[in-house]
Image: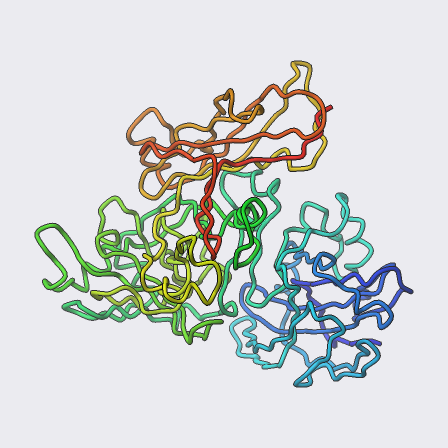
Amino acid sequence: MKISFLNLFIVTMIVVFRAGNATPIEVATCNVGCQIGSEDAYGSVWKPQLYNYTVDIITVIIDAATGSQVTSHDARLINPRSMFEAASASLQSLQEFHQGVFVVDGTTTEMFGTTLTWPSSDLRLAKYTATATIKGEDSCKTTTSVYTRPTNNYWEPMGTADGSWLSETWGVCNPCPTGAEAEYVYTGEEPLNREPEIEDLLSSFITTKGSYDRNHSAILDINPAAHILHIDGTVTTPLDLSVQQLQNEFPQHEVLCALQCAGNRRHTMRTKIKEVNGIDWFDGAIMNCVWRGPRLRDVLARAGIQDSLMTEKGYIGHAAFACYETPCQDDSWYGGSITLERAMLEDGDCILALEMNGEQLTPEHGAPIRSLCPGIAGARSVKWLNRITVQLQESPNFYQQRDYKILPPEATCVKEAKKYWPLCPSMMDMPINSIVGIPKSNSTVQVDEDHKVEVRGYAVPEGVHGPVVKVEVSADGGETWVSADLDYGGHGDLKTFEGRRKIKWAWCLWHARVNIEKGEGGRIVCRATDAGGNSQREHGVWNLRGVGYNAWGEVTGLTIV
């Protein structure tokens, strides 16, 4: 069974369901000779998503004999991002591709039919549309596409360290990406949500590639030249600002900031305490980047905040961010807000980000404009921003009112949570946190000649109280602690006010050498302290949504040799 592509085959995202030991099945071919499939039968979903266009190419095939045995643990996904630029540079137009008919568990099903019958109750179906814009030309194709999502939302990376699996299957790439470039763990649901392997995340102080993605909608591709940001609400002069105006009419401000999902470390809460609702984030839903754009306070000052929101003690009300460009999973638009006091804080560093790490924002990070609110949960740094409303109340959006809140322990299920949503405050400042990234849990570690092991991780401060000033590591359950060395990548220091100011919102990478007894069942923990005196506690507090978890970082099940 084949699908022919008349011009160029680009794969940027592939979910692979390993269907057990089966006869090799050729899933797809293209004119450059790529073949997906090796020693097993696969079900494959291809969804190319490049920086300046999105187009869906889908194939599905599941081995009829074993398809019903597919489990969520067996589903794995990779994204060799290194293919992107070279392939897109030569792409001149989007060619039509043939639709296919595939056998799924013995049932013949049309590829783009309205319904597909799948062999496993662990999988669900959904549809979305995509629009392609290539080299500035509107070359649009809207398709009904199918994706699958196993219920636990998380898969391990596939492929060997030297990339041999990729060399075998990604014939489109010459040379094929190495293991290091076969990048990161993704969830299989649409919208795109992913986190990097922790070793890759800790490899650089600045997160330059493979950062986590958290989305509640499809990734948007917006033409910056036509995009307008509206400023309205309780202001004296409503504004309509182009991207060019934001670049040229306001001073540009640079912020080094760690941005993280409110659900970072949810997996630890789920496994150490009890089940929670939400994507099974491990420790990688965080990135540390340099952001650049006009200060939010400068833009709001031009609009003029009305006197009704100003008191002797300061501002009241909220700055509500919104993207009305596309519907989300739980609302017809996406929105979030922060207090007006925080938005106007002189050293609060809230900006309208136009650049990230010295380059223009890419679509997956909210291009052309994203609100960037340092120290605050990433849900308030709204992507594809097209409106800021100054108002007395918080944003009415679902994700402000019925998500990203720390519910009390009494809210043990969705039904019980209903009465608590309006009673609980929306998450704002993220808590002090740190994790042990290396070694990994359940790994074998060799001590050095001094009977010590090298331990590495990251730490991030609470809200406005950065930077992190201390990380401690223990290999005896917290009886004794070793101070770790802190690495701020040369961007600042802890000795001077200016040095601390530069790294106020950043994470630090840390490393330490600790004594640990040989044997099985080894455990290493860490705890961080920031400039405001906030320190991690040993135990976390459970909440239904699994947000804001910040108990001691730890790895367990170590075999020390």
From the top left corner, tell me how far across and down residue 466 is, in percent: 35, 37
> Residue 518 lies in what quarter of the image?
top right
In the picture provided, is 250 more to the left or to the right than 315?
right
Q: Residue at x 26, y 59 (%)?
A: 249
Asked whether residue 34 is in view, the answer is no
From the top left corner, tell me how far across and down residue 291 is, in percent: 40, 49
Q: Is residue 47 above or below residue 522?
A: below
Asked whether residue 453 is in view, the answer is yes
From the top left corner, tell me how far across and down residue 337 is, in percent: 31, 61
Instruction: From the viewer's side, name the closer residue of 159 and 308.
Output: 308
Q: Residue at x 53, y 56 (%)?
A: 276
Q: Residue furthest left?
A: 312
In the picture provided, is 391 more to the left or to the right than 433?
left
> Residue 488 lies in what quarter of the image?
top left
On the rendered image, what quadrant is the C terminus found in? top right
Q: Is residue 350 above or below residue 302?
A: above
Q: Residue furthest right?
A: 23
Instruction: From the viewer's side, name the closer residue of 405 and 464.
Output: 405
Q: Residue at x 54, y 31 (%)?
A: 525
How many numbered discs? 0
> Residue 231 lies in what quarter of the image?
bottom left
On the rendered image, what quadrant is the N terminus found in? bottom right
Q: Is residue 213 above or below residue 346?
A: below
From the top left corner, tell me how far across and down residue 187 is, in percent: 61, 59
Q: Is residue 70 above or below residue 325?
A: above
Q: How is the image coloured?
A: rainbow
In the picture provided, is 395 more to the left or to the right than 219?
left
Q: Residue furthest top?
A: 450
